[in-house]
Image (cartoon, rainbow, N blue to C red):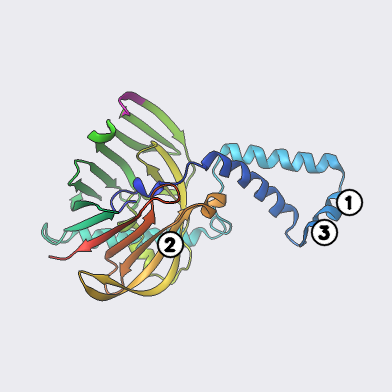
């Protein structure tokens, strides 16, 4: 996240490479035991098949893993859900774009242990899209541009304390990174797939939170401090009540986590106001065990 740092919410994903390897094993075993349960049953089934066939099947899975990220099961089986979900996001963005400049801005406060950062969010309409700008009191700056499809097309991040300033643009199934990263020139691409890129979760998942869907299609987020994109998924956990500026507020809780095996290691929580879908709260641990909980809250005028 963010809470305007979709970036920072990725703390604790150092296990990514290990997770990808474990994910390979899970895919293979899941394919072999679709109708079988138990370790003994798996061994019996493997014993009936020639060793040569199993090796070929495993090799095919490995090739598929190299070509694209593994999406959560069931997402690609219902393309109409993706279209409907993006339509909801587009309607929500259109509503924001139609607001006055005063209405299209709000403030957040991020607290981690004893450290506080104030965040000012501005929504600026663009021809066929929307620009979301985040100004942090610690000097960081994030800029996310949404295109006509309601998905992210460009992301810019500036962080003097981390010595980075770069821009990411989507070009088909490629993300192009250009700028300065940790004091060094950055110019590279990352291969992704056809899942949407939704950099600002606080905004992008509002329509999903208020829909009847329990799980969202998979989507990409760029982790700014690593300059890498990670495939994510969201789960609607239903109605909840949280404090907003000292007032109990009816909200919808959404859990966001990496797709695949990495979901075991990290997740974050977002709350959206039931009345209008406005983002009001975020919670996650952005680091290793023992790191203080980070909370982002909406600050009412």
Distance (Cα) linking label 1 and label 3:
11 Å
Residue 28 in the image: state x and y as whole percent: 70, 48
Discs 1/3, front:
3
Q: Is residue 48 above or below residue 20?
A: below
Residues drawn in magenta: 181-186
Please identify the quarter of the rendering in which residue 38 is found.
bottom right
Q: Examine the residues drawn in magenta and state their main secondary structure.
A: strand
Secondary element at image label 3: helix
- Residue 127 can be seen in this image: no
Query: What x and y, as percent, mark residue 210?
Result: 36, 70
State yes or no: discs 1 and 3 in contact (Cβ < 8 Å).
Answer: no
Is 4 left or right of 107, judged from the image as shown? right
Q: Is residue 222 visible?
A: yes
* 3D distance between C-alphas at marks 2 and 3: 34 Å
Please give the label number shown on residue 41.
Answer: 3
Check if residue 182 falls in the magenta segment: yes
Q: Is residue 104 left or right of residue 71?
A: left
Q: How packed is label 2: few (under 14 Cα within 10 Å), some, or many (20 or more)?
A: some
Q: Is residue 140 part of the magenta span, yes or no?
A: no
Q: Nearer the viewer, residue 96 or 287?
A: 287
Dividing the image into 4 quarters, which one contains the C terminus? bottom left
Q: On the image, numbered disc 1 is attached to which residue?
A: 48
Q: Position of residue 253 (x, y in %)?
A: 38, 68
Which callout, 1 or 2, points at the residue further toward the start of the chain?
1
Q: Earlier in the sequence, mark 2 or mark 3?
A: 3
* Residue marked by disc 2: 255
The residue nearer to you, when weighing 149 against 13, is: 13
Query: Disc 1 or 3, which lies upstream in sequence?
Result: 3
Q: x, y (%) of residue 81?
A: 47, 62
């Amino acid at each position: 996240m963010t809470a305007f740092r979709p970036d920072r919410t990725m703390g604790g994903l150092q296990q990514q490479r290990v997770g990808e390897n474990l994910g390979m094993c899970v895919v293979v075993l899941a394919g072999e035991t679709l109708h079988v349960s138990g370790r003994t049953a798996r061994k019996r089934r493997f014993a009936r098949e020639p060793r040569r066939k199993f090796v070929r099947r495993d090799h095919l899975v490995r090739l598929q893993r190299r070509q694209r990220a593994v999406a959560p099961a069931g997402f690609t089986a219902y393309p109409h859900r993706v279209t409907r979900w993006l339509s909801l996001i587009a309607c929500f963005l259109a509503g924001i774009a139609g607001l006055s400049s005063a209405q299209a801005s709000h403030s957040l406060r991020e607290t981690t242990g004893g450290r506080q950062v104030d965040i000012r969010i501005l929504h600026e309409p663009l021809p066929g899209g929307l620009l979301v700008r985040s100004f942090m009191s610690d000097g960081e700056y994030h800029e996310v541009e949404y295109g006509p499809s309601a998905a992210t097309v460009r992301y810019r991040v500036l962080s003097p304390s981390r010595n980075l300033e770069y821009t990411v643009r989507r070009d088909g199934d490629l993300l192009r990174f250009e700028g300065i990263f940790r004091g060094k020139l950055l110019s590279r691409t990352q291969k992704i797939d056809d899942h949407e890129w939704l950099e600002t979760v606080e905004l992008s998942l509002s329509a999903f939170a208020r829909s009847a869907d329990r799980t969202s299609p998979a989507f990409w987020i760029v982790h700014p401090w690593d300059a890498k994109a990670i495939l994510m998924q969201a789960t609607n956990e239903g109605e909840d009540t949280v404090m907003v500026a000292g007032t109990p507020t009816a909200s919808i809780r959404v859990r966001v986590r990496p797709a695949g095996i990495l979901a075991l290691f990290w997740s974050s929580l977002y709350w959206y106001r039931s009345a209008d879908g406005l983002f009001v709260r975020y919670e996650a641990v952005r680091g290793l065990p023992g790191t203080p909980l980070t909370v982002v809250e909406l600050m009412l005028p």
